[in-house]
Image (spheres, rainbow, N blue to C red):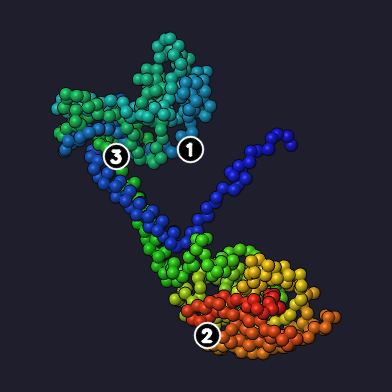
Amino acid sequence: MGGADPKESRFKQQKLPAWKPLPTANVVLPIVFILGAACVGIGVALVLASASVKETFFLYGDECLDQGLTCLHKFNIPTDYEGDVFFYYYLSNYHQNLRTYFSSRNDNQYLGNLQSTSGCAPFDKDGDKPIVPCGAVANSLFNDTYTLSWKGIIVPLTSDGLLWDAGQFKNPPDNGGDLCSRFEGTAKPPNWGKPICEMDGGLENVDLNIWMRLAALPNFRKPWRKLNRIQGTAFEKGLPAGDYLLNITNQYPVAQFDGDKGFVVSTTSWAGGKNDFLGIAYLVVGGLVLLIGAILVIVHCKAGHSSKGQRRQAAPNDMTSKDYYFDSYSHFGIHEEMLKDEVRTNTYRNSIYHNKHLFKDKIVMDVGFGTGILSMFAANPDKSSRINLDSIVEVIQCKIEDIKELSFGVEKVDIIISEWMGYCLFYESMLNTVLYARDKWLAKLFITAIEDRQYKEDKINWWDNVRKMAITEPLVDVVDNNQVVTGNYCVKEAALTVKKGEELKGVFTCTSNARNERDLDFNIKVSFHDWLNSVTSERRQKTTLFHCQNRDNNGHCLDCLTSSDYPKINFSPIGAF
């Protein structure tokens, strides 16, 4: 394909730093409480703002029954309405949200294209003339009018400030004549008493624009006028208290849809007009969020998932060998080796599947969960086709020694399973952890010998030439079967009834592999004591010592150092040297 290659940048090459949030309890719970408190605070503010609004409301549909005539309604305002005062008309049982009703309109026509009537049927045309404005919404325009007086003085009203400029309808372009000349060749809606050009402002009429902004609920109010606070009059500071007389020109029928009409006089606040529902809704939502947060805290504490039981993610510069050890389980490689070890994995699987009667309806603890493969075997011992692990398996993400109590009130478990040996008990060993959790368990440790001159040269001897450094820890690697030069022999068989920290002592012997043609004769003795182990080769008459360099508070070995004065031993996953 032709064209220049895109300019290389960190953005295009997707090399920018990424952030992956970790939704732990320490992060989620504060957010829940902050959101709940914010909703409650907003709700309180809205309720107080609504309570500060002064309002007078009355219905007049039953008083004004004769359409086309005027009627009078007296009402009293007990206190001064200071500041801006708005007047609204009110309709009940009027469903402007009916689909066939609100879709009967053409906004393109309302912006000056008078011939556009699509979507307005059946109020689209009168003969060959387009109806302007067309549609059912415009045809049902509210047309009651009002005159308000106080002590014989007409209250000054204005429509200024009721509409935003955005979204307002537009008249056709000026043709040099009057407004009606712009609407020549059009017809009025059937329910209107006069054409659009005779209304104040034409399509830009304030009452028309407000009516066309549909209400979502069947009972609604819409702004009609605003108090004109003329300087030097009694209405300069607002609407004074007293008796008022409302002269109503009754033109809009409501009996046919079993509705009613009303009139509203109201002040406003920073949050708008009187609206108790919005503040109450915020209070209810905020209260529910806080309640959910409290429930989550209780569940979190009782389930034993407090932050004390979770490992802290150390900064890279502060990470210790222990941090690197636990971090290694965040990657696929270390789990891949176990899953691909079919002998080991199938042995665990078969021991569970062949003894499914022992696992039925039992509580099983999997120490060192990892990928969860052992838990999956235990959760489905009869090999059902489908199971819901979420309802069966509960994961506790912390060290078993840090668990104060198990979830759901469990005090004892029936079975403990674990892949606890790791690499020949030298790496990933969980023996102490299993001893902590177990009732009884049986363990066997095997060792074998390998020969790989090139590997030893690359991985061990090479370090002797780098600033005279010697390897300071055992090697963990996969060994090819052809490199094995002896058989596999049991090092130790012990029932796990020993006490935690108790010394294990034993002796084993390895002879050369029968299929290996080389004349190798190994007789190796191993004892477990204060040193991790001592290995003696009778043929070479030398000993390799694995010295315990660091111990924890309980005296258990953390780091092993191979003495550079003795031959080095190479360990494979099955304990090869």
Which mark's residue is nearer the viewer, 3 or 2? 2
Whichever of callouts 3 and 2 sits on the residue coming sooner in the sequence is: 3
Distance from label 3 to label 2 (Cα)?
Answer: 70 Å
Distance from label 2 to label 1 (Cα)?
Answer: 76 Å
Instruction: From the viewer's side, name the closer residue of 393 and 529.
Output: 529
Quadrant occupied by the C terminus: bottom right
Relative to 422, is 180 on the left or the right? left
Tag 1: amino acid: Arg
Relative to 470, is 223 on the left or the right? left
Whichever of callouts 1 and 3 sits on the residue coming sooner in the sequence is: 1
Tag 3: amino acid: Trp
| Residue depicted at x 66% and y 66% | 466
Instruction: From the viewer's side, name the closer residue of 565 and 447.
Output: 565
Residue, far top: 176
User: Element type at marker 3?
Assistant: loop
| Residue depicted at x 53% and y 80% | 556
Which mark's residue is nearer the viewer, 1 or 3? 3
Name the residue tied to disc 3: 270
Name the residue tied to disc 2: 500
**271 shown above or below 384:** above
| Residue depicted at x 52% and y 78% | 551
Tag 2: amino acid: Lys
Question: In the image, residue 523 lies at what x, y percent?
Answer: 73, 87
Relative to 548, is 535 on the left or the right? right
Distance from label 1 to label 3 (Cα)?
Answer: 34 Å
Question: In the image, residue 374 lies at what x, y percent?
Answer: 62, 74
Q: Pointer 2 and pointer 1: residues touching (CB < 8 Å)?
A: no
Instruction: From the viewer's side, name the closer residue of 38 and 338.
Output: 338
Name the residue tied to disc 1: 99
Whichever of callouts 2 and 1 sits on the residue coming sooner in the sequence is: 1
